[in-house]
Every structure is written in C-alpha cells, then in structure tokens.
C-alpha cells in the first residue's frame, strides 16, 4: 500500500483490508468471466430463493436501521429510500428472477465481417472486470448491483451507506449463499465490512489497479466527490432535474395523471419530476387544474407570475428553483411558449437525466424526443419509468447521464465492453 493511500485512510489495517478485497475481487472476476450462463443462473436462482426465505431477517435488520435513522433526525425522503417493506423485499426477489431470465450478454458476437484477405473479425461482449458500487441509504442496491454484476460476469465490491449497514449485510448474506450453492467464489460479491468512511477514499483510488469502474448511488455531494476524486472511470448522474412539458395538444386527463405520478409517486427517487412546464397556449384549460391537483395532493408549488395568478397558494419561484432537485413534495412550474421554449428551458436547466412531453401532436412529440439531450426522453409517460426494472433489465446498477459507454439505466448489457476476435488462415501483413 502506498503512502498516499495510507494518508487518505489513516489506518494501515483498513488499507490492508481494502487492498485484499480488491485482489480477491480481481481473482473472482477472472473466474466469473469464464463461468457458463447456467452456473451464473443457478446462483441467481439460489439468491432469489434465499431472499424470500430470509425476508423476516432482512426486514428485522432494516427496522433497526430505520429506527437509528429516525432517531438521528433523518427526513421523510431519506427514510422512504431506506425503508424496506414486504413488498419491496419481494420486488428484490422478482428482480433477481428477471435478471436470471434475460439473455447472458457475455460472449455475444455483436458484429462479424470478413476482410478481402480472408480474415474474419468479430466484435464480442466481455465483462468490465471489477465494479465498485458506493451507495447511500437504499439497501436494495445491494441486491440489484450484486446480481447485475454476476449476470454480466463482473466481480463487485459494494460499499453501502452506514445508515443501511445492517440491511445490506442481511441481503448480502443471501447473495453469498447463492454463490456458494453454485460453486462460484464468494469474493464475486463483496460487501465492505466496515462503516469507516475512509473505505470510500480507498475505493476511489482504484485499490492498486484492481477496480475497473465505479458507480456512485446517492446524493449530489457523494456523486460530486466520486467524479472529482476517482482515478478510474465512473458511471453516474449528478442529479435528476427532470421536467414534464404539457403541450397545447395534451389530453388534460392524461396530463393530470402523468404529472401527479411523475412528481408524487415517490418524491425521493432520481426519476421524480422537479419542474412542470405548461404551454402558454394551453394555460386557460390546463394550468389551473394541474396546479390545483398538485397542491391538493400535498405538493408545494413554486411558480412564475402566471402560475401564481391561477392559485394564491403558489409560492413565487426563485431563479435557483429551476435548477433544483428537490427529492421532496415540491415542484417548480412555469408557462413556456410552445415546444421550442420548453426544449430551450430544459437545455438550460436540465441535468440530462429524464424529461417527458405530454402531447397528442405527433410532430411536437417527435421534435421533443429528437432535440432534448437527455439519457431518457418519454412521450405520454411518467418520468418515474426511469428505472432499469421498468426497462426490462430486472434491476439497474444506476442511471448514467454521460455519453461514453453507458447511458440511462445501467443493466447487465451495459456492464460489458467488447473485444475483437480475429480468425485467420495464416495471413501476414505485406
């Protein structure tokens, strides 16, 4: 271990522990890269079974985590992300079943061609290697990240938040049980066994070259730190300043249903809508019903002058509201002059995460989908579909808003890269 890493950590013992985890994960990654799909699927089936069998242990561990977080004054959005229910545990198990059922991406030949000299060149999917996932509060990430990495042939090092430490351990025990039953190395899915925050700095260093990519799942400060300090590639989104634009052609009932769901289904998820844009041409018919609906559902609305005039309960929007990810029952709202102005607003204030248009006008919808530069764009659907499970991936390891390699929900396929296989018959280059 280098002196610089010891300086980050301040503990030779933790430095040694983390280095050993990285080396063990690297060895496990080599095994997983060659593991047949049937063996990985046996592990996944056993994990699914263990999650269901141990749901009482998982919920009991989670109840302790939630009690501690409540006592420490955590807000409602944080507690919602932390809390597991029987339905959420069942959803974890169902997600594993979906991941098991998707095609194995490893070894897939995505393209093949023959050169004039007779050589055949293939582009084939291969695992990334070792993935480190650093996350806060959401204990389900333990299962999602673990099974997606396994399916894609990657080893994973999981560093969950201290607030979900007990929940993460209970879920991880089920994943390890699946690995054992399938004869795969336990280091394929490693949970960092300490709450020491210095472990994060060590992961960001890359653990002596043993980490190939880092995925942060958490608040803006965590993601910003990871993107600033990481010495290996990062799949991440900094924040989800997501918009719903209601066009003049929108069906009002549909617009009300989509806006309410996009904002209020779960306010603390990254796919929640944070800004409502309404076409000025539809203000007379659509604006007041939408604003009234939001307020009566318990959502605070902060609006421009036009929005304030339709309901005295609307608070004035400050300039920073257009750039804010609330993760709470708060939304900013304004009138815009048609789809072009909506696109311009999103380009200025959005975060390239998820944006939606509600419109019956096919041309307006096509323009929005083509010109809004976000990882996910939707027509006549809620932004809360920004989720790997809803995309059919079974789960997601995160949402990526960058433009290199992975974008949008990161599932098993996005956790692979490719290499070229060249078949010759003795060719030499002149």
Image: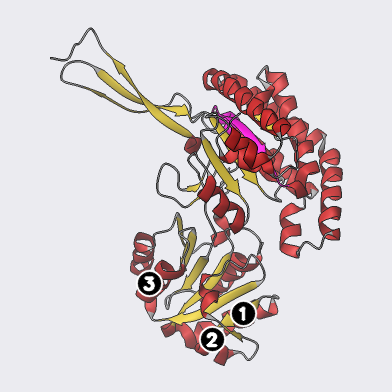
Please tell me the numbered disc located at residue 247: none
Identified at 49% across, 31% down, the residue is: 128
* Observer able to see residue 376: yes
User: How far across and how far down the image is residue 105, in percent?
Assistant: 48, 30
Disc 3 packing (10 Å; few <14; some 14–19; many ≥20): some
User: How far across and how far down the image is residue 87, in percent?
Assistant: 76, 49
Please tell me the numbered disc located at residue 344: 3
User: Does 207 sit left or right of 422 as displayed?
Assistant: right
Q: Relative to residue 160, is residue 385 depicted above or below? A: below
Magenta residues span: 149-161
Tell me the mark number nearer the camera, choosing from 3 and 2. 3
Q: Which residue is mark 2?
A: 307
User: Does 17 sit left or right of 397 as displayed?
Assistant: right
Q: Is residue 157 magenta?
A: yes
User: Does 141 sit left or right of 420 as displayed?
Assistant: right
Q: Which residue is mark 1?
A: 301
Q: Secondary structure at mark 3?
A: helix
Q: Is residue 132 magenta?
A: no
Q: Are marks 1 and 2 in contact (CB under 8 Å)?
A: yes
Disc 2 packing (10 Å; few <14; some 14–19; many ≥20): many
Q: Are marks 3 and 1 in contact (CB under 8 Å)?
A: no
Spatial separation of the CA atoms under disc 3 and disc 1:
22 Å
Q: Secondary structure at mark 1?
A: strand
User: How far across and how far down the image is residue 207, in percent?
Assistant: 58, 32
Q: Relative to residue 148, is residue 121 depicted above or below? A: above
Q: Earlier in the sequence, mark 1 or mark 2?
A: 1
User: How far across and how far down the image is residue 173, in percent?
Assistant: 77, 31
Q: Earlier in the sequence, mark 3 or mark 1?
A: 1
């Amino acid at each position: 271990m280098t002196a610089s890493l010891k300086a980050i950590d301040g503990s030779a013992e933790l430095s040694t522990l983390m280095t050993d985890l990285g080396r063990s994960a690297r060895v496990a990654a080599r095994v997983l890269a060659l593991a047949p799909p049937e063996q990985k699927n046996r592990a996944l089936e056993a994990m699914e079974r263990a999650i269901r069998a141990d749901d009482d242990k998982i919920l009991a561990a989670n109840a302790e985590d939630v009690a501690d977080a409540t006592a420490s004054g955590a807000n409602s959005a944080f507690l919602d992300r932390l809390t597991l229910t029987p339905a959420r545990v069942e959803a974890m198990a169902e997600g594993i079943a979906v991941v098991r059922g998707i095609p194995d991406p490893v070894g897939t030949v995505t393209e093949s061609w023959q050169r004039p000299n007779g050589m055949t060149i293939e582009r084939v999917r291969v695992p990334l290697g070792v993935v480190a996932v650093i996350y806060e509060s959401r204990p389900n990430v333990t299962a999602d990240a673990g099974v997606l990495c396994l399916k894609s042939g990657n080893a994973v090092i999981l560093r969950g938040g201290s607030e979900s430490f007990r929940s993460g351990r209970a879920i991880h025990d089920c994943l390890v049980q699946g690995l054992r039953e399938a004869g795969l190395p336990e280091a394929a899915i490693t949970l960092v066994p300490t709450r020491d925050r210095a472990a994060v700095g060590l992961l960001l260093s890359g653990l002596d070259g043993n980490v190939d990519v880092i995925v942060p799942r958490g608040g803006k400060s965590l993601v910003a730190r990871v993107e600033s300090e990481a010495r290996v590639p990062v799949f991440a989104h900094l924040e989800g300043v997501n918009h719903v634009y209601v066009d003049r052609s929108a069906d009002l009932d549909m617009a009300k249903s989509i806006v309410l769901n996009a904002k209020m289904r779960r306010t603390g998820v990254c796919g929640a809508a944070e800004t409502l844009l309404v076409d000025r041409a539809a203000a007379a018919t659509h604006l007041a019903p939408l604003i009234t609906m939001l307020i009566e559902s318990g959502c605070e609305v902060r609006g421009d002058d036009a929005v304030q005039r339709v309901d005295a309960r609307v608070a004035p929007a400050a300039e920073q509201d257009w750039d804010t990810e609330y993760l709470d029952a708060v939304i900013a709202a304004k009138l815009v002059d048609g789809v072009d102005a909506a696109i311009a607003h999103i380009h200025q204030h959005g975060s390239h995460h998820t944006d939606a248009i509600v419109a019956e006008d096919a041309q307006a919808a096509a323009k929005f989908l083509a010109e809004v530069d976000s990882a996910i764009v939707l027509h006549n659907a809620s932004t809360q579909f920004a989720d790997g499970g809803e995309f059919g991936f079974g789960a997601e390891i995160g949402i990526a808003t960058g433009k290199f390699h992975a974008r949008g929900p990161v599932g098993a396929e996005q956790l692979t890269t490719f290499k070229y296989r060249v078949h010759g018959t003795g060719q030499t280059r002149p």
